[in-house]
Image: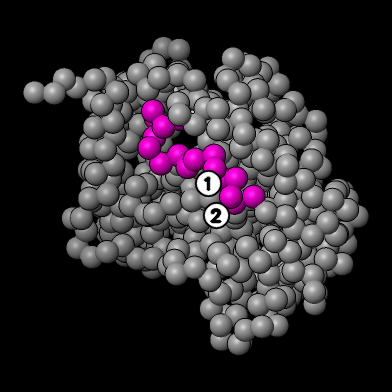
Amino acid sequence: MTKQTPQRIARILAMIGFALIANQHFLPAAPPASIPASPGAVKPHRLIVLTDIENEPDDTESMVRLLLYSDVIDLQGLVATTSVHLKTRVAPESIRAVINAYSKVHGNLLRHHPNYPTAEHLQSLVKKGRPEYGMDGVGAGKDSEGSDWIIRTLDKNDGRPLWVSVWGGANTLAQALYTLRSTRSTTEVDRLVSRLRVYTISDQDDSGPWMRRTFPNLFYIVSPGGYGAATWTGMNTVVPGIDNSTISTKWLAENIQQGHGPLGAAYPDVAYGMEGDTPSWLGLVPTGLGSPEHPEAGGWGGRYKLCVPELSAMDPKGFTGGVPVDAETRPIWTNAMDEYTPPVSGDYGRAVHSGGKTFKDYRATVWRWRDDFQNDFAARMDWTTKPYATANHPPVPALGHPEAITVHAGKTFQLSAAGSADPDGDSLSYLWFQYREAGSYSGAINFPGAQNLIHVDLTAPKVERPETIHFILRVTDKGRPALSRYRRVVVTVVP
């Protein structure tokens, strides 16, 4: 009989956990399309990144983090572009430098997950946009290596949507769409546009508004206007009244930059704000919070609503680098407000209880997950230097019931985390909470007992029509750093 090493046992446990998640087949029917998918039940999301790297250090910071998630995100393009802050040059060599650092730790990363791509493959994805600003770089004869690559990737026989994460200017994508419109039939353009999912970090050139006007069916997430009115700023905003330590320079130095090998050393000091671009792809990480196809459900990258934002809400006089702020002409996915009360750890008695301070803010859609995704980043940076047995890996939450259940008003029902496991054998903590803004029912559900139990019993509220209530299970291990994963339960309450 083959001796099982601790690493192999841990991997087997992880696979068993993911199998439990992927095989929750006891629903009477498949969940509706609005129900977010479980982690491990879907293929990795395809992603092309457009980056004005060298504008300031935060693009390099985001690139370091992104490569640590290249085992669970299918990277299909890394394109150097311009922006309003970097108008006349592109810097693909800076993307290549981060990949070179990644190449030195790739072998160790494979000890933690077999799907990390080779550095050679990643280098083949590096492309250049035109060294021109905004719509000056869009038009007849303005094709570039980057815009051609976007078209080539869209043309692939792949049923998955193509996400385009825009960290600077968007004109390379705009040029791809311009060329498609000039060379393909209307039906074909519509088909290809329907496969795109775009998230831009504000508008850092004037091509974003052009795309939204010209292609009204293009899926587009953006906080247009002044940067101060943007959801993505929740990534690095210091919030009075909550613990901001995981975005501090001290935390970054200790957990990312120093003593964590060549890739950690490639993470530069913060100049203006830490990783302002990261929210544009963070929601693609399979955490169990749901599908990025449903920005209204919320996840690590924030929560967004589909609407035509008021011009005044865009902070039109705020800082944009000089990009004009115009009224939107059609619904886009944009800022959504969350009310968030951070849970507090107890030194005695109940391990977790509700905190005393509540925040209501569009940036709270990112704040509420920030410590979790920062700890996850730190753990993955550990993967670059540590063997499997001495590093931490995320737990595998499970449910003792389907992800979608229906109950009658006034009836009791139970939420259960039965079957949750940890690949490292760590002790687990549980926390259940209602994500009020994600469901149609706006009232608060009373938890009559502790919310940190593996099972909780609740009573469905009185309703006059069918309403949905979203509950999140957060499972956190006691490893170092502590890691969290989630399951979402959508309860439909009928009269």
Task: Name which quarter of the figure residue 148 lies in.
Answer: bottom right
Q: Name the residue under label 2.
A: 76
Where residue 121 is drawn, which disc sits there? Answer: 1
Mark closest to the chain's N terminus, 1 or 2: 2
Task: Name which quarter of the figure residue 108 lies in.
Answer: top left
Magenta span of residues: 109-126
Examine the rendered structure and indicate whether residue 213 appears above or below residue 56: below
Task: Name which quarter of the figure residue 258 lies in.
Answer: top right
Residue type pointed to by label 2: Gln
Residue type pointed to by label 1: His
Horizontal side of residue 160 vs 233, given as left or right:
left
Going by the picture, which residue comes out furthest to the left? Answer: 1
349 or 475: nearer the viewer: 475
Tell me which residue sits at (61%, 75%) in the image. Answer: 217
168 or 336: nearer the viewer: 168
- Mark 2 residue crowding within 10 angstroms, few (<14) / some (14–19) / many (20+): many
Residue 122 within the magenta-colored segment of the rendering: yes
Where residue 9 is drawn, which disc sits there? Answer: none
Position of residue 305 measured from the top left corner of the image (x, y, whole percent): 60, 60
Position of residue 426 measured from the top left corner of the image (x, y, whole percent): 32, 21
Residue 369 within the magenta-colored segment of the rendering: no
**Element under disc 1:** helix
Horizontal side of residue 17 vs 120, given as left or right:
left
Going by the picture, which residue comes out furthest to the top? Answer: 348
Examine the rendered structure and indicate whether residue 268 appears above or below residue 213: above
Tell me which residue sits at (68%, 42%) in the image. Answer: 95
Examine the rendered structure and indicate whether residue 82 appears above or below residue 372: below
Position of residue 452 measured from the top left corner of the image (x, y, whole percent): 36, 29
- Mark 1 residue crowding within 10 angstroms, few (<14) / some (14–19) / many (20+): few
